[in-house]
Amino acid sequence: MWTGVQFTGSLGARASQRWFTHGWSPDWHVIWYVVPTSPRPGAPELEWNVAVERASPTSCTYWIKVTNLSTAPVSFEARYAVLS
């Protein structure tokens, strides 16, 4: 298993945006997670969902939609873990 940060981003209050990352092997089991880097205690700040495109026989593209649940801007890291 290996892990890393694929990209960083920020969203305004209650905003959503979709990012993509391409060139991932379809043989890998990749987990995506998004972690706020601007602390705000008391409630969840972000939610995300991931969609997958089989771009070619040898490549996958991941589409990651991030939504800011808070009433303030939030910065974050989009992280991955390759399990196999």
Image (cartoon, rainbow, N blue to C red):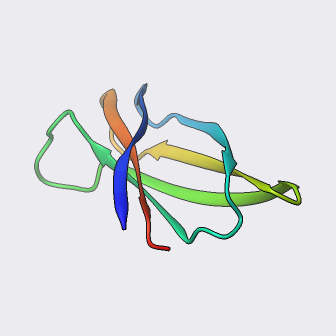
Residue at (32% x, 30% y) in the render: 75
Residue at (59% x, 47% y) in the render: 65
Left or right of residue 76: residue 58 = right
- The answer to whether residue 42 is above or below residue 20 is below
Which is more toward the observer, 23 or 39? Answer: 23
Residue at (15% x, 41% y) in the render: 40
- The answer to whether residue 84 is above or below residue 44 is below
- The answer to whether residue 44 is above or below residue 11 is below
Q: Quadrant of residue 9?
A: top left
Residue with the most extreme left position: 41
Left or right of residue 53: residue 10 = left
Percent coordinates x, y for residue 53 in the rendering: 80, 56
Percent coordinates x, y for residue 63 in the rendering: 67, 48
Residue at (51% x, 34% y) in the render: 15
Left or right of residue 54: residue 24 = left
Which is more toward the observer, 66 or 32? Answer: 32
- The answer to whether residue 66 is above or below residue 51 is above
Left or right of residue 69: residue 45 = left
Percent coordinates x, y for residue 64 in the rendering: 59, 48
Percent coordinates x, y for residue 12 in the rendering: 42, 25
Count of numbered tags: 0
- Quarter of the figure that contains the N terminus: bottom left
